[in-house]
Amino acid sequence: MNRNVFILNPKAGFRKLEEWKALIAAKFGENAIIRLTERAGHATEIAKEYTNSTIFAVGGDGTVNEVMNGLVGSDNTLCILPAGSGNDFVRTLYKDIPKKKRTVKGILERIETLKPKKIDCSSANGSYFMNIASVGFDAEVVRNSERYENVPGLRKLSYIISIFYTIFHYRGIDLKGEIDGIPFEQKSLLLCVANGKYYGGGVKIAPEAEFDDGKLDAYLIESVSPMRFLSVLPKLAAGTHTKLRFVKHFKADKVTLQGENLTLNLDGELSPTQEAAFQVIPGGITVLAPEPSIPQIS
């Protein structure tokens, strides 16, 4: 039996929790199962409990990442109800839905118009990610932003503040590895491996990425001076940085890397590592999405 299971992250919007429950009840009534996450990794555990169901991830990119880690390879379908501060993956997934409607209420109002579609996801060191993985500058930005998230009045600006802090305190990393068997070694500011186009609250880091092409998009950015990097930030935000001489772009099936004291960023979730292997999983997960974003399942 197909069930509608809603996995809610209270921390993503604790002030709106009761509002979300009311919206879900009004739309689905007794056909809704509501589960609240209690700890890190709990959303993955909950998602694995169900089969042949539609699993709704209610939260930000971190919640979506946890839920999808419990769904890869299953017969469940994922539906994202964006309720976080970044909501970057839905910028690509829901590109045909007006930005103001990419909310819990807005998606529920048009749920009947969404269709099941197969999209790619990727693995990295035993975990899965659906949007973007990286090491280097942006992982440091995420880590540094945590110091501002609990400061009154700065939570919504924490990522922006952290970008400028990191620009003047981060000097890059010595990376080596392979992209589809082709070796590379250089002082790098960032290595980004992408299925989606956006991260960091709307930065279009991977403009060529498509999550239904069976490929990863790898962007390798050489280390540059703080002032040089500061001058190209507008290009990074707009997705026009790929023409810069110190930015290299690759379409790949597999990317491996090694480096000292790396911080691995998987859809905003951080972990320390000395190496990483990224592998695309074509059509690895089924999601509900508006047409004509990507080809519908036949």
Image (cartoon, rainbow, N blue to C red):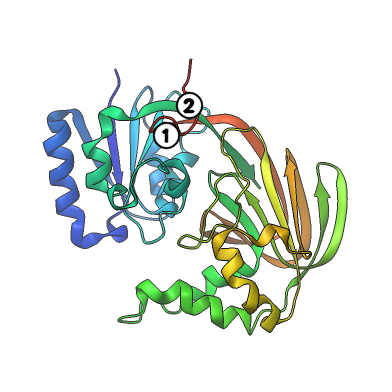
Q: Which residue is mark 1?
A: 48
Label 2 or label 1, whichever lies nearer to me, is: 2
Q: Which mark is residue 198?
A: none
In the rendered image, the residue lying farthest to the top is 298
Give percent across and percent down for residue 169. 64, 84
The residue lying at 26 percent from left, 47 percent from top is 104
Work out whether residue 70 can be spotted: yes
The foreground one among 10 and 121 is 121
User: In which image quadrant can residue 141 be found?
Assistant: bottom right
Taking the spot 73% from the left edge, 81% from the top edge, the residue there is 225
Residue at numbered disc 2: 74
- Asked if disc 2 and disc 1 are in contact, CB closer than 8 Å, the reply is yes
| Mark 2: few/some/many CA within 10 Å (<14, 14-19, 20+) | some
Please give the name of the residue rendered at 36% of the width and 79% of the height, measured from the top-left corner: 154
Amino acid type at mark 2? Ser
Residue type at the position of mark 1: Lys
- Which x, y percent locates residue 78? 40, 34
In which quadrant will I find the N terminus? Answer: top left
Looking at the image, residue 108 lies above or below residue 156: above
Quarter holding residue 127: top right
242 or 169: which is nearer to us? 242
Q: Secondary structure at mark 2?
A: loop
**Left or right: 191 in relation to 88:** right
On screen, residue 174 above or below 105: below
Specify whether 4 is left or right of 253.
Answer: left
